[in-house]
Image (tube, grey):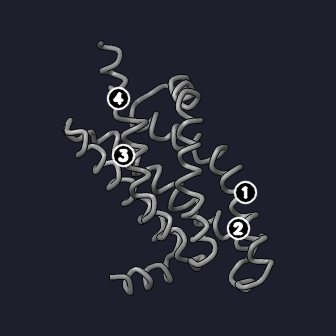
Amino acid sequence: MYGAYLRVLASSPVKTKIWTGFLLGCSSDLAAQARERKGWDARRTSGFAMFGAGYMGCFQHHLFARYAQLWPVTNAIGTGMMVTNVAKTLAAHQLVIYPLVYFPVFFLITGTVGLGLSLQEVRDKLRNEWWETYKIGVVVWTPAMLVQFCFVPVPLQVLYITACSFAWTTYLSNRCCSGPKKDEAHAL
């Protein structure tokens, strides 16, 4: 199966990574919903599928390639340059991309598409949940990304990080999306 994935990845890298992210988004939300035992909310799953395909698949394909151009690691293994470049990549991701791109995009897509929230409701949700979720995420993602940027070849980084993302995205689905849907909240 891994060999088949590598062949498809080589012939169609962006499309393969989009499908990888899509499947991760679906499966992690389905796992979260199964844990909640409230029945399946297809709209919520579609929000996670869209986020997975767009951010985890497509955006990260381009982002990780850009990191590799700016701060190459593969030819620097065992040198001081490797440590410097990995540190720069981690800092860019954890201090810029993660708080300023990942979370706003996550809340926007899962909130509007998945939960049917208005932009103002998404903004309020982001404000209320961002800091606590960000702090936990930095603890979870710094070691995972350290391994990624040191040892995983760039073409396989989206696969690696989406595999690591399964538990995290399931957690986010439970934390950020398990309350009443917009229509249910207004009926209460």
Query: What type is the residue that disc 2 sits on?
Result: Tyr
The quadrant in which residue 181 appears is: top left
- Which one is nearer the viewer's eye here, 145 or 19? 145
Q: Are marks 2 and 1 in contact (CB under 8 Å)?
A: yes
Foreground mark, 3 or 1, reads 1
The N terminus appears in which quarter of the rendering? bottom left
Tell me the CA gap for discs 4 and 2. Answer: 37 Å
Percent position (x, y) of residue 134? 58, 42
What crowding class fits label 4: few (fewer than 14 Cα within 10 Å), some (14-19), or many (20 or more)?
few
Is the residue 184 above or below the residue 130 in the image? above
Where does label 3 land, which residue?
A: 46
Q: Which one is earlier in the sequence, the residue at label 3 or at label 1?
A: 3
Q: CA distance from mark 2 to mark 1?
A: 9 Å
Q: CA distance from mark 3 to mark 1?
A: 29 Å
Asked if residue 39 lies left or right of residue 59, the reply is left
The residue depicted at 47 percent of the width and 78 percent of the height is 9
Disc 1, disc 4: CB below 8 Å? no
Q: What residue is at 39 percent from the left and 59 percent from the top? A: 24
SS for callout 4: loop
Of labels 2 and 1, earlier in sequence is 2
Quadrant of the image containing the C terminus: top left
Which amino acid does the dot numbered 3 rest on?
Ser
Report, in whole angstroms, how far the alpha carbon at label 1 lies from the one at label 4.
32 Å
Give the residue pinned by disc 2: 67
In the displayed structure, 179 sits above or below 10; it is above
Kind of residue at disc 1: Ala
Check disc 4 and report the residue beneath it: 179
Residue at numbered disc 1: 92
Q: Nearer the viewer, residue 137 or 69?
A: 137
Mark 3 vs mark 2: give the one in front: 2
Mark 3 to mark 4 CA distance (whole Å) = 17 Å
